[in-house]
Amino acid sequence: MAIGAREFIDKLLVEKYAQEKVDNHDEGALVSKVSADDMMYAMNASSSTYRNMLQLNQRLTSVCYGVVSKSAKYNEYAATRQ
């Protein structure tokens, strides 16, 4: 398996840019724009909110099951028939 350009236009582009040098590693590019503490705070707040949502969803589901089971009316005919 050969590595390189196969089509004519690609070969011309490779020849044109083969000797170009790019130096984009300045100090500003390597420094994070967001502090680690701010990122950890945001992640913690998001996970705490999601955890609370899951707990509330679980409690709401439990309450709904209780309401449905208490409001169910059982028919004696259906119970004795089985």
Image (tube, rainbow, N blue to C red):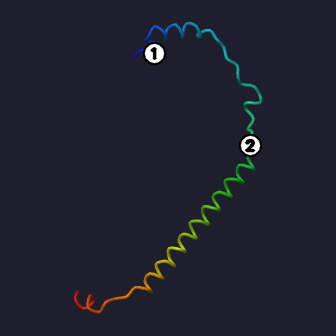
**In whole angstroms, how far apart are the C-alphas of marks 2 and 1?**
39 Å
Q: Is 22 situated left or right of 62 in this image?
A: right
Read off the residue under disc 1.
3
> Of the numbered discs in the image, which one, if any, rests on residue 34?
2
Q: Amino acid at mark 1?
A: Ile
Q: Amino acid at mark 2?
A: Val
Q: Position of residue 49 (x, y in %)?
A: 64, 62
What residue is at 37 percent from the left and 88 percent from the top?
A: 73
SS type, badge 2:
loop
> Of the numbered discs in the image, which one, if any, rests on residue 12?
none
Q: Position of residue 36 (x, y in %)?
A: 73, 46
Q: Quadrant of the C terminus?
A: bottom left
Q: Quadrant of the N terminus?
A: top left
Badge 1 crowding class, 10 Å Cα cut-off, few under 14, some 14 to 19, many 20 or more, is few
What residue is at 43 percent from the left and 12 percent from the top?
A: 6
What residue is at 72 percent from the left and 54 percent from the top?
A: 41
Q: Is 63 situated left or right of 69 in this image?
A: right
Q: Is 77 situated left or right of 21 in this image?
A: left
